[in-house]
């Protein structure tokens, strides 16, 4: 089980309470599809994804981005048991959708996150080793960038560390089916 400080809990809850899910989700997923074009293969039924403008204006991308954020909201509401919260979704992504597990990995964007990692190593347990969490990630990075842009100066190093710790726990829970 992950240990959350009061600051981390309050920060994560505050971030999600102030997000416009439709805007943030759409921007994060669109950014992911533009920056990491190989991820488009999972969205072949979304229609025109031929260039950045088409992706940014695609209503199916926007809708799925909203779905993704609402999925993260489940973790916010169940911070003490994120692994169980995502058990079924982990199976779906690995066995039915065959999503490449590298798409879930979180890259550490801040050195301050290393200390947070010490308290979330326990969630890694038998599933994903700590080094796999250090590999480049995709959607989590894009979401971090979008949230940082929306929060501006309020997205301090401490806020970023808490947000990335939260994403690392979610990612670990999603990738546990792969190992």
Image (cartoon, helix red, strand yellow):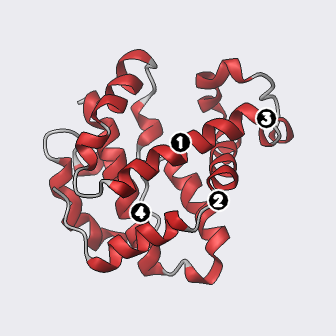
Distance between the alpha carbons at the discs numbered 1 and 3:
16 Å
First in sequence: mark 2 vs mark 3: 2
- Residue 134 seen in the figure: no
Quarter holding the N terminus?
A: bottom left
49 or 1: which is nearer to us? 1
Residue pointed to by mark 4: 164
8 or 36: which is nearer to us? 8
Q: Quadrant of residue 153?
A: bottom right
> Label 3: few (<14), some or many (≥20) within 10 Å?
some
First in sequence: mark 4 vs mark 3: 3
Q: Would you say 160 lies left or right of 64 here?
A: left
59 or 133: which is nearer to us? 59
Residue pointed to by mark 2: 20
For discs 2 and 1, the disc positioned in front in the rendered view: 2
Dot 2 lies on which element?
loop
Quarter holding the C terminus?
A: top left
For discs 4 and 1, the disc positioned in front in the rendered view: 1
């Amino acid at each position: 089980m992950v240990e959350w400080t009061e600051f981390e809990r309050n920060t994560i809850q505050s971030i999600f309470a102030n997000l416009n899910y439709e805007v943030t989700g759409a921007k994060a997923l669109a950014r992911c599809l533009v920056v990491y074009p190989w991820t488009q293969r999972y969205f072949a039924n979304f229609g025109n994804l031929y260039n950045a403008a088409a992706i940014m204006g695609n209503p199916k991308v926007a809708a799925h981005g909203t779905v993704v954020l609402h999925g993260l909201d489940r973790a916010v509401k169940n911070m003490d048991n994120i692994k169980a919260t995502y058990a079924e979704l982990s199976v779906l992504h690995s066995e039915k959708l065959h999503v490449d597990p590298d798409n879930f990995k979180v890259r550490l964007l801040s050195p301050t996150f290393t200390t947070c990692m010490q308290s979330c190593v326990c969630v890694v347990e038998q599933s994903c080793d700590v080094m796999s969490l250090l590999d480049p990630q995709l959607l989590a990075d894009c979401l971090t960038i979008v949230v940082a842009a929306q929060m501006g100066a309020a997205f301090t190093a401490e806020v970023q560390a808490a947000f990335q710790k939260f994403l690392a726990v979610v990612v670990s829970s999603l990738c546990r089916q792969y190992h």
